[in-house]
Amino acid sequence: MSEQGNIALHTTNLHVGYKKGHQTQVLFEPLNIQLIQGELVCFMGSNGVGKTTLIKTLAGIYPPLGGSVTHQYPVAIVLTDKISGGLMTVRDLVTYGRYPHLNRWLTLQDQDHRLIDNALRLVHLQSIENKQLNQLSDGQLQMAMIAKALAQDTNMLLLDEPTAHLDLNNRVEIMNLLRTLAREEGKTILVATHELDLALQTADKIWLATQDQKIVEGMPEDLVLDGTFDRVFQLKGFDLKTGKIAHLPYRKIAVQLAGVGPEFLWTKNALERSGYEITSNASIKILVVIHQEGASFRIEAAGIQKEFSTLKELIAVLNNMEN
Amino acid sequence: MKKSSPSLVLLFLTTGLGVLFLTNISLGSVSIPIKEILRALFSDTGTASEILWQFRLPKALTCILAGSALATGGLLMQTLFRNPMAGPDVLGLTSGASLFVALLLMAGQYSGLAFIQGPWSVALAASLGGATVFILIIGIARYVQDNTALLIVGLMISAATSSVVSVLQFTSQANDLQTFMIWMLGSVGSTNWSEIIVLALIVVAGLAISMTMIKALNGMLLGESYAVSLGINIKQGRIIIVLITGMMVGAVTAFCGPIAFVGLAVPHLVRLILPTTNHKTLLPAVCLGGATLLLLCDILAQLPGSTQVLPLNAITSLIGAPIVIWMVIKAKRISV
């Protein structure tokens, strides 16, 4: 028991890498890292930095080149490896999760059926459990792979880019599911991901692989504020502290904006994206008005006083004023 | 595709096998009615009984053993290499066997294989050839971790041995060449009872061992990393599967010559009626399917003219190739 909680996994001077012929390629400095039970940790870093290799080493698939990995619990994994068997049904795939507990004839007990059903329910795939894998969408296939890992009924999950190639909706659903599993079932979860915004909003902790072969660990917000993210990713035009893409007020026109709520935020977004600078005092004033049936946008400037129901019209009028 | 029940398909295949077995032994240059066949099965007197026990039963049993061994070998190779084009011949086992048989039959006096003489010589040469390639492949498999790379090595060995065989064919005498060509055409009609017992022991052992490997076989479909994470010993599984495939295919090739197509096509035909990837049902179904198909091919080989028997390989390829092409076109793709 550490001061922070139960340690689910820790490494001691772990050397991660691979052997190529007689040469050994070590990817990180000796690692002494740990995962605390019930935490969702996002593992981030540039492409090719060695995230997959580290995950596979932590899962015991690759042998460490030195040092050791100590598990408190068995581990289930979701990888990016392509699988064969297009004729396999979703249920067959999830059944694989029970393999460590099955005899050589693969005889399923009641307990196995229950855990398979439960895993399918958690990822909302019960309705298509008899569909073949080659009929699934990318998102459904990824969910099925996660269900396979859940059916393994382990306290620890290691996932390698589970949201790659998925649309925003599926990405959010997967990250939410993982967060729920960590919170409600006390599972320890490590996710390698490129989804900066999702990671910042869901992770309890971030592991950040830096260019100098270290892994920096911390709360997402701390790493944002101390500039670690900026250093590692050398962000080009993405302002992490505001969470937005940085816009240049290229029109050199200032407007004053008043209003509340999401309507205010999206109006601000539209103005900034269109190149306007928003200041606290300007001759052009824009007011976001909230009615019963929605929002409207009022503009007050020299000689003009108009109200529009869409931002498109508002921006068009502003653009015209410039000419 | 509608889901067929595995037990129903297995029942269907078993019934088909029984019917074809009886049809097979009742057909030949002398037609024997089924009633007579059934009587002859349980007696050892009379012409019918003699024909049956001397010729028809050995041939039909050889069909069953060879068909199930080759088809199972094909399934094992397709799963191991995760490649729908894999088959027992792909590893170079059959071409290794062909090379040694060619050395024996066409260059016996120069090759040093002349010491193997007598009725078992061809079988022995084929086994030696298969085993040589097989040891070579296992050796290479220790260095090559990638299954696709291993597949390519197998193809290259096939190509190399085939070219040696064609040089031998080019330089050999007409008589020797004919003996070799007949062996190459594949035959299930030349086995005697002692050969069948050897074949049966090897094939039954191979099938039994493969049934104990269903967990590893299923695991291989997910790839090595997933399999390892599910507690499957993939390295050991690979070696055992290559071993039993080599054993079964080697034995069949030794006694029957290189029989084409069965190993590649039967697993796909079975998956067409039983769309599953679970080897618990696939293995018995493919085994039954292979036996059934080879019995059918043998029936077709002896039908036309009734006295002349067509080469088995011509039939297996002639039926098989169009079926596989039709299947690929219909399904638009083909998977393991």
Image (cartoon, helix red, strand yellow):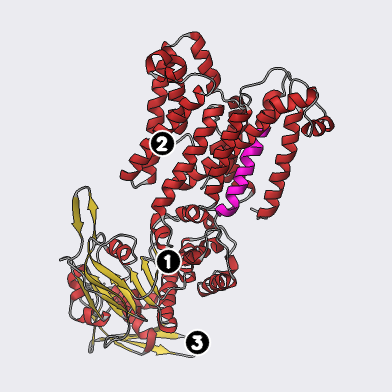
Q: Is residue B290 magenta?
A: yes
Q: Where are the magenta residues, as a range?
A: B276-295
Residue type at numbered disc 2:
Phe
Label at residue A167: 1
Category of crowding for the residue at label 2, using alpha-carbon neighbours closer than 10 angstroms: few (below 14), some (14–19), many (at least 20):
many
For numbered disc 3, what is the local secondary structure?
loop
For numbered disc 2, what is the local secondary structure?
helix
Category of crowding for the residue at label 1, using alpha-carbon neighbours closer than 10 angstroms: few (below 14), some (14–19), many (at least 20):
few
Q: CA distance from mark 3 to mark 2?
A: 78 Å
Foreground: A274 or B95? B95
A132 on left or right of A239 = right
Q: CA distance from mark 1 to mark 2?
A: 48 Å
Residue that label 3 marks: A293
Task: Determine the chain carrying the residue at label 3.
Answer: A
Residue type at numbered disc 3:
Glu
Are the residues under badges 1 and 3 in a single subunit? yes
Closer to the chain start, of discs 1 and 3, is 1
Q: Is residue A70 above or below residue B174?
A: below
Q: CA distance from mark 1 to mark 3?
A: 31 Å
Foreground: A81 or B31? B31
Q: Is residue B258 above or below residue A84?
A: above
Residue that label 2 marks: B134
